[in-house]
Image: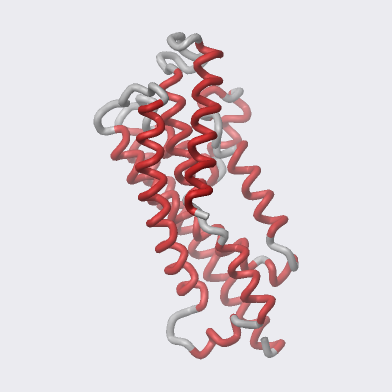
Amino acid sequence: MLWGRVLFYVIILLIFARLWEALLGGSGPVSGAAGQRPSHYIWYLAVTEWIMLSQPLLHLDIEADLRAGNVGQALSRPLSYVAGKLAEAWGEVAVRLAVLGVCGVACARLLGAEWPEPSALPLAAIAGVLASVVMTLALAAIGLSALWVTDSTSVYLIWQKLCFVLGGLMLPLSIYPPWLRSLAEWSPFAALLFGPGELVLGVPPAHVWGCLLRLLCWGALFALALAGLERRALRIITVHGG
């Protein structure tokens, strides 16, 4: 599974690197994004896909436990069910971040991407790790939604498509139309993907603190929402004897 993600990661970087090279002639800046060249976009995509591909299918794992009635067994344990699943997921995420990170940097360099500013990649890595933690909270909430919608896959697909569009997974929000960029920046998706990815595009240092602050705020909101969902879910399971 991990090596499949690595292969997909490399293919995506290869396709888009060649696409941007063809569109931008290898040197010209993008209209509306002054000073940014194809290599900037390779690094940007390397960061956003790194975050996205590091996520486990936690929602399916939780949904399977709900269907099998395994969640009820967690009621007698001192550690909450969701906390246990998150701990397992974050362990998976840590391994994937490490492996995909090394592959992403190596692949970007092999594709001819110039090194960004010296501090850009470390800062993007810090923001990316935080974004991955926050995104896992959202996936846990999506998994718990199976109690109400039966199949959490539909909720996940909506989440995934919003990450693509409002998160700027493939293209940075800086080249979006102003109205769409404004809409996206008010969503958590921009904080999770565009925020860390933007740090390799040569933005001012002040953007780093704004990115981290937005991630922390959304993380706190997701954690509160997840705690509320878990309480309601366990109440339903207790009432129905599951």
Residue at the extreme left: 118
Q: Position of residue 192 (x, y in %)?
A: 48, 45
**Picture coordinates of residue 45, whole percent (x, y):** 48, 33
Query: Which quadrant of the structure image shows residue 70?
Result: bottom right
**Left or right relative to 39: residue 177:** right
Where residue 1 appears, as percent x and y from the top left, is: 52, 55
| Res. 179 image quadrant | top right
Q: What is the tally of numbered marks visible in this picture? A: 0
Q: Is residue 173 above or below residue 51?
A: above
Residue at x 46% of width, y 55% of height: 134
Single out the residue that lies furthest toward the right.
Answer: 150
Instruction: Measuring from the top left, give residue 136's x and y in whole percent.
Output: 50, 58
Nearest the viewer among 137 and 42 is 42
Write the residue at 55% across / 27% down.
Answer: 15
Q: Which coloring applies here?
A: secondary structure
Looking at the image, residue 110 sits to the left or right of residue 32; the answer is: left
Does residue 110 lie above or below 187 as drawn? Answer: above
Indicate whether 213 appears above or below 148. Answer: above
In which quadrant of the rendered image does the C terminus lie? bottom right
Q: Residue placed at 55% from the left, 13% from the top?
A: 23
Give the residue at x 47% y 64%: 89
